[in-house]
Image: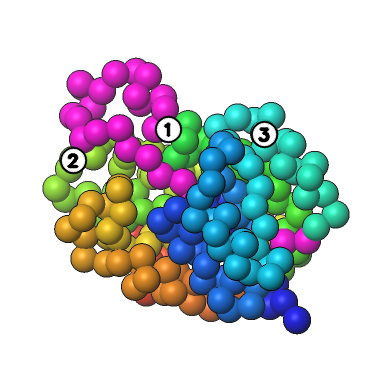
């Protein structure tokens, strides 16, 4: 018997694939999304899952594709909706950032995840969880060194948009989580990051599960500790 149904948006590789793998290992039914038509690690996971993991196509920067996914999932009930997104286009001082780069990062890291949440929220069980992958770099309090101006700004914007969302739907019983995975060895985190995906992801999942059924918004790291806004 399934432990629940999770939709992981952005599950083709690294942290997203790690989340899909961990939830499948824990007995969940997992729907993961990938961009484009190419084969990914999620396809390999699905092939080995005896039908427990399924793959959907979604470029979440395209509103029409979000709407199409919503139609394809109509009638499904999700215990977890988790949106994993994060790009950076280089570490430039904000005065040197081209407008196109700024828009690309903001649309991918802040606007698009919230469009997914707004569109798919009605599929989430009344006491289910909606989570979004944030970052320690979205914390204003923790920004003592600067750098990664646009990436930091995009994650701070995502946090602010989730706070507005939480207020708008304050009567809902969903658990709302902004999750920080730690500094992980990915393309984004770099080869010298202290954490592996295998060290970060189980903590992320444990934290999500620990707060299942707790209404309201929390900003937490992979160890379950609060992150200052």
Membership of 89 in magenta stretch? yes
- Residue extending farthest to the left is 145
Which circle's residue, 3 or 2, is located before the other in the chain?
3
| Position of residue 155 measured from the top left corner of the image (x, y, whole percent) | 39, 44
From mark 3 to mark 1, how far is it between C-alphas?
18 Å
Locate the C terminus by quadrant.
bottom left
- Residue extending farthest to the bottom is 1
Residue 107 shows up from this direction: yes
| Residue for badge 1 | 106
* x 42%, y 68%: residue: 201
| Residue for badge 3 | 65
From mark 3 to mark 2, how far is it between C-alphas?
33 Å
Which circle's residue, 3 or 1, is located before the other in the chain?
3
* x 30%, y 32%: residue: 89
- 139 left or right, relative to 157: left
Q: Which mark, residue 147? A: 2
| Position of residue 172 measured from the top left corner of the image (x, y, whole percent) | 71, 59
**Segment colored magenta:** 77-106
For the residue labelled by badge 3, is the local secondary structure a helix, a strand or a loop? Answer: helix
From mark 1 to mark 2, how far is it between C-alphas?
16 Å
Membership of 165 in magenta stretch? no
């Amino acid at each position: 018997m399934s432990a629940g149904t999770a939709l992981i948006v952005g599950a083709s590789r690294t942290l997203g694939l790690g989340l899909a793998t961990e939830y499948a290992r824990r007995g969940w039914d997992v729907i993961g999304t990938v961009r484009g038509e190419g084969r990914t690690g999620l396809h390999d996971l699905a092939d080995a899952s005896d039908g427990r993991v399924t793959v959907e196509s979604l470029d979440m920067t395209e509103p029409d594709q979000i709407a199409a996914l919503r139609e394809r999932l109509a009638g499904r009930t999700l215990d977890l909706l988790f949106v994993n997104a994060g790009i950076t286009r280089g570490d430039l001082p904000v005065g040197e950032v081209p407008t196109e780069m700024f828009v690309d990062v903001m649309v991918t890291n802040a606007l698009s995840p919230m469009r997914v949440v707004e569109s798919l929220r009605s599929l989430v069980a009344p006491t289910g969880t909606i989570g979004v992958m944030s970052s320690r770099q979205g914390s204003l309090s923790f920004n003592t060194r600067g750098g990664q101006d646009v990436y930091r700004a995009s994650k701070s914007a995502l946090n602010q948009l989730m706070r507005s969302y939480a207020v708008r739907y304050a009567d809902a019983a969903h658990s709302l989580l902004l999750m920080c995975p730690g500094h992980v060895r990915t393309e984004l985190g770099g080869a010298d990051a202290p954490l592996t995906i295998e060290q970060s992801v189980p903590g992320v999942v444990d934290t999500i599960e620990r707060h299942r059924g707790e209404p309201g918004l929390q900003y937490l790291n992979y160890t379950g500790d609060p992150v200052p806004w």
